[in-house]
Image (cartoon, coloured by chain):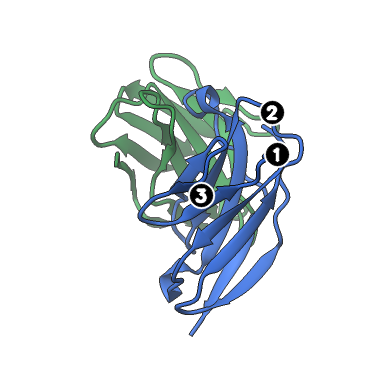
Amino acid sequence: GAVVSQHPSWVICKSGTSVKIECRSLDFQATTMFWYRQFPKQSLMLMATSNEGSKATYEQGVEKDKFLINHASLTLSTLTVTSAHPEDSSFYICSAPDREHNTEAFFGQGTRLTVV
Amino acid sequence: DAKTTQPTSMDCAEGRAANLPCNHSTISGNEYVYWYRQIHSQGPQYIIHGLKNNETNEMASLIITEDRKSSTLILPHATLRDTAVYYCIVRTRMDTGRRALTFGSGTRLQVQP
């Protein structure tokens, strides 16, 4: 099946710094990608929808100036957590749907962000 | 997406079949039943989906009741690597290509040695 690669798998950063997470579709084009956040023992919560060539759509309560999303190509979306704080520590996951067959969504491996 | 109800947790002995139920009594005629799972600290993984007929692939079988108000995911010979949270999601096929999946709480399956 199709592969979505997410990088890095884990990152530790200091408070106040910014962290960039990359999500790549390796063998298909993804005009749309989704970014989720997952806190311990909780389910995945959608943060934003990333659209190639246009602005991302953010879910209610997600600060667009803090979580910058760039979808510059058909195979790459990036999420930048700006001025990170310890409460931003979480598991971030990206996803790209199979728009050709509409059968399933493909997920990245996830990125464990720890802000110290 | 139609609402789904799953048990919070289940245990299964290694090598035995794991039967994970899902209720979706408000499912519409054009909505499919999808199953995903999430192993700890990994992204979710697609397992199987179906409309009204039973489906089987290399990972699992999906049994959908005739009235389509409930379904069961069957892992025929559970292994320790099947320990994960299993999500039942109901949605139209077109939505799969357009909208993000909405994850409920899922069923935490613990496979015991």
Query: Which residue extends farthest right?
Result: B25
Of residues A107 and B68, the one drawn nearer to the viewer in this rendering? B68
| Quarter of the rendering containing residue B6 | bottom right
Which residue is the site of mark 2?
Answer: B28
Instruction: Report if residue A48 is visible in the image.
Output: yes
Q: Earlier in the sequence, mark 1 or mark 2?
A: 2
Looking at the image, tell me whether mark 2 or mark 3 is earlier in sequence order.
2
Please tell me how crowded label 3 is: few (under 14), some (14-19), or many (20+) other residues with Cα within 10 Å. many
Looking at the rendered structure, the secondary structure element under dot 3 is: strand
Residue B103, quarter of picture: top right
Give the alpha-carbon distance from disc 3 to disc 1, as whole Å.
22 Å
Q: Quadrant of the N terminus of chain B?
A: top right
Q: Secondary structure at mark 1?
A: loop
Q: Nearer the observer, disc 3 or disc 1?
A: 1
The amino acid sitting under disc 3 is Tyr
Residue identifier under label 3 = B36
- Name the residue: 39% across, 46% down: A108
Same chain assignment for discs 3 and 1: yes
- The chain under label 2 reads B
Mark 1 belongs to which amino acid?
Answer: Asp
Residue name at image x 65 percent, y 26 percent: B29
Marks 2 and 3 close (CB-CB < 8 Å) = no
Farthest bottom residue? B113
- The alpha-carbon separation of the residues under discs 1 and 2 comes to 11 Å
Residue A18 makes an appearance in the image: no
Callouts 2 and 3 on one subunit: yes
Residue assigned mark 1 = B67
Whole-percent x, y for residue A112 in the image: 46, 56
CA–CA distance in space, label 2 to label 3: 20 Å
Is A99 on the left or on the right of A65, as rendered? Answer: left
